Image: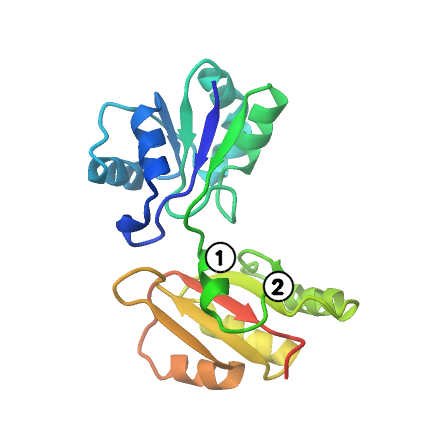
Amino acid sequence: MPLFVVATPIGNLEDITERAKKVLSSAEVVICENKERALRLLRHLGVRSKKIIYLPAPVEKQKSEKVAEEIKDKDAVLIVSAGTPAISDPGGYLVRTCISKGIKVIPIPGVSALTCALSVCGMPTNRYLFVGFPPKNGRENFFRKIKEGIEKFDFIPAVVFFESPHRVIDTLIIVKKVFGDIPLFFGREMTKLYEEYILGKIGDITQELQKRGSIKGEITVIIFPQIE
């Protein structure tokens, strides 16, 4: 029996695909990162009476073997809180374990914050480097290593990363220190009621954000180190 890796909406629940609905409705088991969010989505879809397996990031590596054994004879679905599993979210260990056990893994594509941001940034994105969430500590060294890496090539116009609202200003200040005042795309609360998109220089966007009392929501940032 297969494991279906299902992308779910990052905000607007209407972004769920018809195929995802069908798979969630027919599966025997739903493996999730967050039980409350999973149940909320299932209720929205009118899906009830599913076995739920809770597999958050901190324990995924240790528990993937057990979960894979439990689902090997069942149709199972893997979802995360929002977006596509294993893209800076849990799922990678379980998928790898299932593959090693001969369990077929099938993607059910849909929403990803990564592709949403790239599609509306208005800048060259034919190639890009995705680096997930910067570390809490050592961010300057993290971005300096990225700069050193892409300076060896001339074909990576965009670098994409995620950031939390309470750290984003400090991170942008570090990015400006490392790369200079280069173009940047700032995407916040994508697909939600208060979604926001800003394209400009790092310095200008940082100043705009600093004027606000607080920043809320999920944030995706794209920088363009090779574009003046």
Residue 213, image x and y in percent? 31, 78
Identify the mark nearer the N-term, 2 or 1: 1
Q: Is residue 150 left or right of residue 26?
A: right
Using the image, determine if residue 18 lies above or below residue 24: below
Residue 129, image x and y in percent? 63, 60
Q: Quadrant of the C terminus?
A: bottom right
Q: Nearer the viewer, mark 2 or mark 1?
A: 2
Name the residue beneath numbered marker 2. 126
Nearer to me, 57 or 9: 9
Using the image, determine if residue 86 lies above or below residue 151: above
Name the residue beneath numbered marker 1. 115
Where, by quadrant of the figure, is residue 26 drawn? top left
Number of residues whose C-alpha sits closer than 10 Å to that of mark 2, classed few (under 14), some (14–19) or many (20 or more): few
Using the image, determine if residue 202 lies above or below residue 1: below
For residue 2, say whether it is visible.
yes
Q: Is residue 58 left or right of residue 45?
A: right
Residue type beneath disc 1:
Thr
Where, by quadrant of the figure, is residue 55 drawn? top left
Residue type beneath disc 2:
Asn
Using the image, determine if residue 6 lies above or below residue 68: below
